[in-house]
Amino acid sequence: MLEHIELFFRSIFIDNMVFAVFLGMCSYLAVSKKVTTAVGLGAAVIFVLGVTVPLNWLLDKYLLQDGALVWLGPEYADYNLSFLSFILFIATIATMVQLVEIIVEKFSPSLYNSLGIFLPLIAVNCAILGGSLFMQSRQIETFGLAVNYGISSGIGWFLAILAIAAIREKIRYSNVPAPLRGLGITFIITGLMGIGFQSFGGMLTGGEETAEAAQESAAVQKLENQEKASLEELKKEEEALTTKGVSYNDVNK
Amino acid sequence: MALLSKKDTNLILDPLADNNPITIQVLGICSALAITAELKASLVMAIAVIFVLGVGNVVISAMRNIIPSKIRIIVQLIVVATLVIVVDQVLKAFAYPLSKTLSVFVGLIITNCIIMGRFEAFALGNGLWRSFLDGIGNALGYGVILIIVGFFRELFGSGTLFGIPVLGDPIEKTGLYATGYENNGFMIIPPAALIVVGVIIWVQRSKNPALVEEN
């Protein structure tokens, strides 16, 4: 349970899709002029990430990883198909987006009207493929965690686009220097927001990384202590030398 | 006859400045920002995109009359994904540490909007040679921005270029560091890339007021 909570907050705030790794910037910049459209796209991203990341996790686990084909029989244990992951992931995403569009249209026309136009856009949104690729490279362990990772990174992206859309609606009333208007100021604001989000880095205490950090700082402390000790020894030696009166000054005399 | 007619030259030169994919068309930002903390990574990324976009544009242009328009997105994705797998495998074989630095961002070339954008906007409607030039031109425009951002971030952030110290040694206090200069750690963190690109846009648009947006 604790790891679920940690992953949830980590993906929303610390490893935020937009501010930490710049995924989905194209649609983030293009569709953030109005809050309502931003909310629509954000919701669609949460939804699609929540579906495709677990699906690709299954593909990765039972098809692509080194030795993943072992369930077919022991003679398949040596196969490593991970080089195929790009093509399979993107095919899954394109198919799923298409499928989701059809299903949503059939069963919930009102949701389709609000999400509809954004769904095709999402197939080529880097955030979706990036979610799957990061899921693979971070070696998320269980299916539940993969679902969690998909949804929470979607929420992180949603938060980011909501915030920038709100700011852009307000900034229309300010006197921005002409060359910076539109794209330029959006970049700089996103950068500043990114710096703000960096402060979430210290939010999670506990877990492995802090333990590692503690070990590291302990090691550093040790080294410093050793240095101090050796310095003290040096000093003592020097003192001893001066008291004995065999310093270089004396030799020169 | 010259190899490149005037029109063809424009295909290459336009995206370098006034129609730049990153600063004007706002395409392909994702990967442009994440890997520019080092100049070397930026350069490799630029070369990878030049390869993928050049070859991809030619392939799509060659197939443009036989792709049914309903499934063209999937066909395009498969073509890009195949080319990117080639790039990824080559990087893993010949430059393993670098492919570790670029990590998932090589894979993200697939969803780089420049590539899909050029396929849609150009390769589906033009011949082989022109599509090839257009691909190279746009990828070069992308690469130029990447290298500018990488140059400034590495120079001010770590005082090195391609990993070679150019401002002296920060620990031994030689070169520029002897005068009290310090590396700007801010340039290394991810949000700095956004601000550097913002400043590039600012400079470009002050020089060419025709590009200024209406708000």
Image: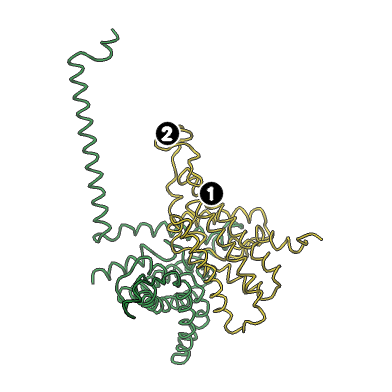
* Amino acid type at image mark 2: Lys
The chain coloured yellow is B
How has the structure been colored for display? by chain
Q: Residues within 10 Å of mark 1 (few under 14, many from 20)?
A: many
- Residue at 58% across, 67% down: B114
* Chain of the residue displaying label 1: B
Is residue A227 placed above or below A246 in the rendered structure? below
Q: Nearer the viewer, residue A226 or A82?
A: A82
From the viewer's perspective, tell me whether residue A167 is left or right of residue A253. Answer: right
Query: Looking at the figure, which quarter contains the C terminus of chain A?
Result: top left
Q: Which mark is residue A75?
A: none
Per the rendering, the colour in which chain A appears is green
Q: Which mark is residue B173?
A: 2
Q: Which mark is residue B151?
A: 1
* Amino acid type at image mark 1: Phe
- Residue A241, quarter of picture: top left
| Disc nearer the start of the sequence (1/2) | 1
- Residue at 43% across, 55% down: B97
Q: Residues within 10 Å of mark 2 (few under 14, many from 20)?
A: some
Please provide percent x and percent y for residue B84.
Answer: 52, 67
Q: Secondary structure at mark 2?
A: loop
Please provide percent x and percent y for residue B24.
Answer: 61, 62
